[in-house]
Amino acid sequence: MPDRVERKGGRTRSAGGTARGGGDPDRGGRVLELRPIREGEIRPIPPYNLVATAYKPSHFPSRNVLLEDHVWYQALVYERTPLGVTMRAEGPVDDPLVKVTVHAERDPGPDLVSRLLKELAYRYGMTADLAPFYERFAGDDLLGPVIRRWRGMQVSASGSLFEFLVITVVLQNATVRRTAQMMDNLITHYGYPVVFAGKEMGALGGPELLDHATEDDLRRLKLGYRARTIRRLTDTFVRGGIDEIELRSLDTDALRKRLLSLHGVGPASVWYLLFEVFRRYDVFQHISPWEQKIFSRLLFGEELVPVDRIVELVTQRWAGWRMLAVHYLFEDLFWQRLQGTGPAWLDELVRL
């Protein structure tokens, strides 16, 4: 694993200033000062690499997460409570231990913290056993060396299903920079600017908070046509009884159909939901145009290869674990780019 890791998201606290706006009529637009309240431990299934799991160089920067000096900071709203979380790996990859500190305005109580630790363990892949994946592909010419570099890296989704859906909406037809701006606007006006552990960050509010926003309110945040989709998603979660925990228990086909019934979820986004939010490791039926260009170079050494040819190769080579296999290859490539050793053609394909 690289010795030096660049910062992602967030910022170190500066003097003065408060956040603008805010959609919560009870919040008044103030920055919440969170203090360390409770500490806990999570013992992931080994092997486990917290930094590689939490920090994904291929993801766009967001002010709700930050990696600095191998400590992972996250601002989140859990059970309608704005919180700050720090996580640090205290043990080696083969005997992992994650230390967690929960920051809040006031003590949320041991029961909520216990549920939060369980949820963090799920979201950050600490409860998943990847030993069969490693055993099966350790000798693969392409994947084997990547596994050795990133052994213990899990797929992760730091936010809830609702947050992930909002992200998929703001990613539509937008550059990485534009997406980051839209998310920043949403957090500022319908989230919680927070300060904890010396970091200024922000958490997107849940659907109950976004329910204060009309479509016109969201359009004023420069979301464009996406405002209608987010408004309808919010209605579905507030009034439609979406239970994310229950969805996790569905088989993949039933889950895919349920997700596709949500407004704004289509063939291009459902596979990412299945993989990142619900840990279905073999879903690999859709490739976006920019990913197609990357996989063409990575797998074939050619500028552009038909999607069906890419899917065929991945299926033949890594069946049963297709999405996880390409996830390892993809993130390894972006780690190389982060460290300044990646191929020159990658920068040409990544839109910032």
Image (cartoon, rainbow, N blue to C red):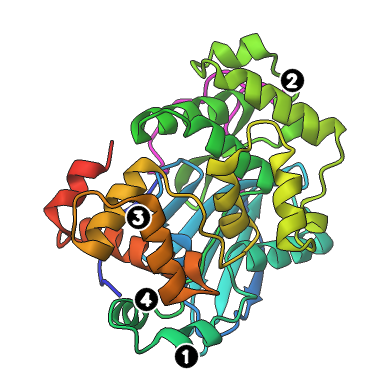
- Rendered view: 193 above or below 335: above
Q: Which mark is residue 57?
A: 3
In the structure shown, which secondary structural element does the residue marked by tag 2 occupy?
Answer: loop
Q: Gap between marks 2 and 3, in whole Å?
A: 33 Å
Residue to which mark 1 is pinned: 135
Residue 115 position, x and y percent, is: 77, 63
Residue to which mark 4 is pinned: 150
- Rendered view: 297 above or below 92: above
Q: On the picture, is 340 further left or further right than 193?
A: left
The residue that appears at 62% across and 22% down in the rendered structure is 22
In the structure shown, which secondary structural element does the residue marked by tag 3 occupy?
Answer: loop
Q: Gap between marks 1 and 4, in whole Å?
A: 14 Å
Q: Gap between marks 3 and 4, in whole Å?
A: 13 Å
Label 2 crowd (10 A; few <14 / some 14-19 / many >=20): some
* Pointer 2 or 3: first along the chain: 3
Residue 135 position, x and y percent, is: 47, 90
